[in-house]
Amino acid sequence: MNKKKEKRIFIFICTAPALILFAIFMIVPTVEVFRMSLYKWGGFTNEKVFVGLNNFKILWNDMNFFRSLQNSIVLIVIVTLITMVIAILFATLLTREKLKGNSFFRVIFYIPNILSIVVIAGIFSAVYDPTTGLLNNMLALFNLENLQKMWLGDQKIAIYSIGGALVWQAIGYYMVMYMSSIASIPESFYEASALEGAGRVRQFFSITLPLIWNNIRTTLTFFIISTINLSFLLVQAMTGGGPDGSTEVFLSYMYKQAYTNSSYGYGMAIGVVIFLFSFLLSAIISHITKREVLEY
Amino acid sequence: MKLKKKLWLTGMTALLSFSLIACQSNETAKVDESGSGKDSGEKQTLHVAALESAYGKDMWTKVIDAYEAANPNVDVELTVDKNLEDVISPNMKAGNYPDVVLLATGRKLALTETLIKDQALEDITDVLDMNVYGEDVKVKDKLVPGFTDTLATNPYNDGKMYLSPMFYSPTGLFYNAGLLKEKGWELPKTWDEMWALGDQAKAEGISLFTYPTTGYFDAFMYSLLLEAGGPDFYNKAMTYEDGIWESPEATQVFEIIGKLAKYTAPTTVANANDKDYTKNQQLILDNKALFMPNGTWVVGEMGEAPRADGFEWGMTALPAIEDNGARYAFTFFEQLWIPSAAKNKQTAKEFITYVYSDEAAGIFAESGAIQPIEGISEKLSGDSKLFYSIYDSGAKAGMGGFAATEAVEGVSMADTLFGTIDSIVSGDKKVKDWQKSVEKVSDQMRAALK
């Protein structure tokens, strides 16, 4: 009994500093965001006016917010889908197949992930440039002039151009994650299935995919969080939300409202919605992808 | 045994919390020390914060040195930074306000606007009646008339000055004077001549117009409003009078911009963001577009950029709407202000009078920063002389911006009035719808007027 108690106290003391720091730097600010979303406040003076849920009411009728929400969802969906497919494909190729220059490709694919997002914005601004850009000039080279676009100027495709840059920078990171779990699958599984006559495609769907499923689930949460964060950085550095707000994502809209429009409280209300949105989305995705964990 | 453990536990907890508190108190102790250290002398400390703009940092250091020499009782702590908001905001949130700030409205982080909306600026009307530091002349007699009764200095439109006018720069349409000379094209005096020139240029593969970003339309739009309806009309528009944006004068303005959109260089929208806007400015240097709205700073900004042979900067006021109609070149100026939460307001006001002294104005002018002081444009030379003489050739000066309102959540006049132009040029929105949404925003802002 006494020993148990002693142990508990010891654990408490050991974890106390971490818990206190966690409370001060994580829980308190989060609660603050929720609290400040109930005020009309510019962010500087003490002139705070309590407005209850009014900020959320305004938000409900703010079409610009819904456009930014729509853009964010588009990015989350396309970036996740495309990156995941390509990353798993490359990961399988690089681990399962004996390719020449295996480790060379590994490094090449991973490089975008080391680059700062501002550098990526610079690279893609150059790629998308309407006159001197790589993309339009490549199309011209293959006589595909009619496919040439104002990649960042056309409001219908600007958000996909941003998505393209996000996919490019994300592939390497997820590829490495998938590679590590593919590499840990025992070789004997593949040998046995090969003896039974399974081809590579069959092996992929029946062995590789089920055995890295848990890893994929984890990365789905990563995809949501990192796309929300990185899309903000990229949009800030590349288009500033333009042309005419067509590439605004919800974090950049929140920033704009909190600072440029001097509506800090309103910005925090947007923050609360983003918080709940990403929390819920992660929970839902985690729930519907739940499978029995296969052990090997 | 039990007691011992309890004691031990309390001891540990006390130690832990003590160490945490110790961290905290250490910080405050440090701040206090530095504060009292400065106050302990006879000297007063004045904290001046200034935005480092195209004019550079040196002029501020020199002016502060000169001020400290002239006024030995004041010790100036100077903060000059390109991202001034990022440097001073955290301190301001913690209650440490600078005493004097040079930061214009219209910046992305909108710190000045936020303080105006929160009525957190000090009323500095009395500075006008104070003597310029070290001189026997009142501030108001030294300033060029007109600068201190605009909405940019008196944001609440109540005759009280909260922001003091500093470096000004005429804005207008910038072009390559060499190209016009070479082609034998005349500078258009009216919009009709402008369209004619546009068609001529089009035949040679040159676009009539481009713009760096839609943000540059502020001065352009204000000038156009002044041309269309005169100062009274302009002030009504700036104070959100009901129906003003649907009046015939405003319709004319919207239609001119709608037509101009058709003459705009095709790649403009794709590059009209904070990252790539210099590519649009480059179109002028490369003779791919004829005119762009800009300010005198563009000369320095594009100083290193390659350019066509025989390139020569030119600047003109906006073409008139009718023959012999008024032509306007909007004057943009930076503002100097005192936060209400500043500690040394009196010293700060004294410092503001000093920046208008001959000594300070001379130092600023050396770096190309021109204050609205009588007679200063005579001292200019080179490109600056050309630009600042725009008003001598008959163009009228427009000044000020929208009146201050309380923050309206989710609604921005700048985004609606200027940002939409990207959509007009790309054809995603119609001029009529644009006009309607501007009037709607104006209605919302009117309700929030201070």
Image (spheres, coloured by chain):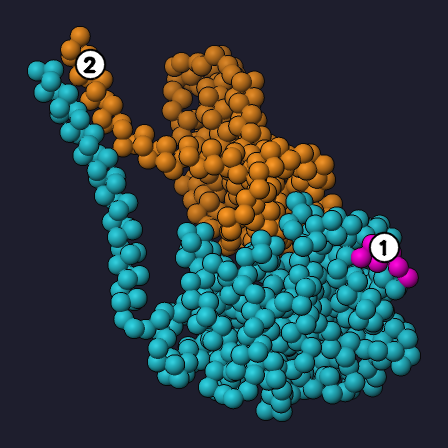
Quarter of the image with the C terminus of chain A in it: top left
Pick the front one: A223 or B143? B143
Q: Residue B243 shows which numbered tag?
A: 1
Left or right relative to A25: residue B204: right
Q: Position of residue B426 (x, y in %)?
A: 78, 55
Judging from the image, mark 2 belongs to the subunit labelled A
Residue type pointed to by label 1: Gly
User: Compared with residue B290, is residue A49 higher up or lower down, i.e. above or below?
Assistant: above
Residue B89 located within the stretch drawn in magenta: no
Give how far across and how far down residue A46 sits, in percent. 50, 48
Most extreme residue toward the top is A1
Residue at coordinates 77% horizontally, 70% vertically from top-left?
B223
> Mark 2 = which residue?
A5
Instruction: Give me the residue at 81% from left, 82% from top.
Output: B187
Q: Which residues are magenta?
A: B241-248
Seen from the viewer's position, the closer of residues B43 and A94 is: B43
Picture layout, residue B142 above or below residue A150: below
User: In percent of the image, x 19 and y 17: which residue is there?
Assistant: A7
Q: Nearer the viewer, residue B316 or B118?
A: B118
Q: Was residue B242 drawn as part of the magenta stretch in this picture? A: yes
* Residue A287 shows in this picture: yes
Secondary structure beneath dot 2 equals: helix
Chain A's shade in the image? Answer: orange
Q: Residues within 10 Å of mark 2 (few under 14, many from 20)?
A: few
Residue at mark 2 to residue at mark 1: CA–CA distance: 76 Å
Q: Nearer the viewer, residue B308 or B171?
A: B171
Point out the image quarter for the N terminus of chain A: top left
Residue B210 appearing in the image: no
